[in-house]
Amino acid sequence: MSTALPVYLAMTHWEFHACAQPPEHIAWMACHFSPYAQGLSNIPDSLPEDALLMVNDRTEPHMHDPSLIARQLTEAVERLQPRGIVLDFQRPSNRQTQEVTAKLLETLPCPVAVTPIYAAEIAKAVFVPPVPPDQDIQDYLRPWEGKEIWLETEKAGICLTVTKDGCNTQPLTEQPTGTVFDDTALCCHYNTQVLEDRAVFSLYRTEDDQKSLLDKAEKLGVTLAVGLYQEFY
């Protein structure tokens, strides 16, 4: 997917080492809280210069040492020279994750982006979840005005089912058939079905829609995007 905005593709350890021709921009997915020690595991030995280094909480932190983790990542930054670090923390309301985040934001010698649930006032950059296909990107990004935005991107669509009781939103499991419409404002395609007891709207983004969305993102000040290698490459 060629856009003016750099799109970093997140690769696992296996994908990175099995790939004969890596993408232009790489994100290492990911360093984890070690299940056997107080620091991180899966820190790479080498990366292309200007890559992103991701840290996630797939393994929940328990008695981990924020100072040790900060030293490990500082050494990795000095050795690997990444563009920055993504703290892709998804488990909410974890005190130890908050402590690690605060320590890393305070000490790391490179740009650091944090997910919204842990992006405290001291975070200069936020790692924003993908823009849903039923939302305008400018409205969606408004809560993070004033911060640098690193935007996650994905191909997943949604299915909106409207009944007398309201609207239910579910992931789109398959691309719709029949008449499909193009919404340039939302950078998506959609299909409608009007049934006896409900109306169903299926929204998704094609590759061209993704490019249009990221072009808009760049104009709105988004610095970079991050997607999954297995989904986009």
Image (cartoon, rainbow, N blue to C red):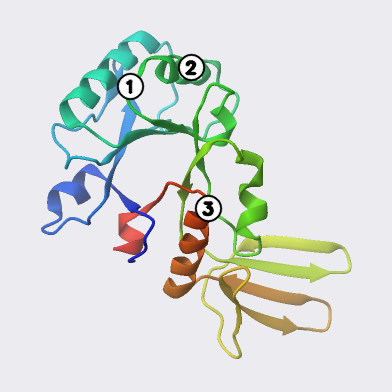
Q: CA distance from mark 2 to mark 1?
A: 21 Å
In the displayed structure, would residue 198 be above or below residue 57?
below
Secondary structure category for the residue under label 1: loop
Q: Nearer the viewer, mark 3 or mark 1?
A: 3
The location of residue 60, given as percent across then percent down, is: 45, 25
Residue 163 relative to residue 102: left or right: right
Q: Residue furthest left?
A: 20
- Residue ID for mark 1: 35
Q: Amino acid at mark 2?
A: Ala
- Residue ID for mark 2: 102
The location of residue 98, given as percent across then percent down, is: 52, 19
Residue 220 relative to residue 100: left or right: right
Q: CA distance from mark 3 to mark 1?
A: 29 Å
In the displayed structure, would residue 191 be above or below residue 111?
below
Secondary structure category for the residue under label 2: helix
Q: CA distance from mark 2 to mark 3?
A: 24 Å
Q: Amino acid at mark 3?
A: Pro
- Residue ID for mark 3: 130
- CB contact under 8 Å: marks 2 and 1: no
- CB contact under 8 Å: marks 2 and 3: no
Q: Residues within 10 Å of mark 3 (few under 14, many from 20)?
A: some
The location of residue 41, given as percent across then percent down, is: 26, 25
Secondary structure category for the residue under label 3: loop
Q: Residues within 10 Å of mark 1 (few under 14, many from 20)?
A: some
Q: Is residue 92 visible?
A: yes
The location of residue 103, given as percent across then percent down, is: 43, 14
Q: Is residue 54 visible?
A: no
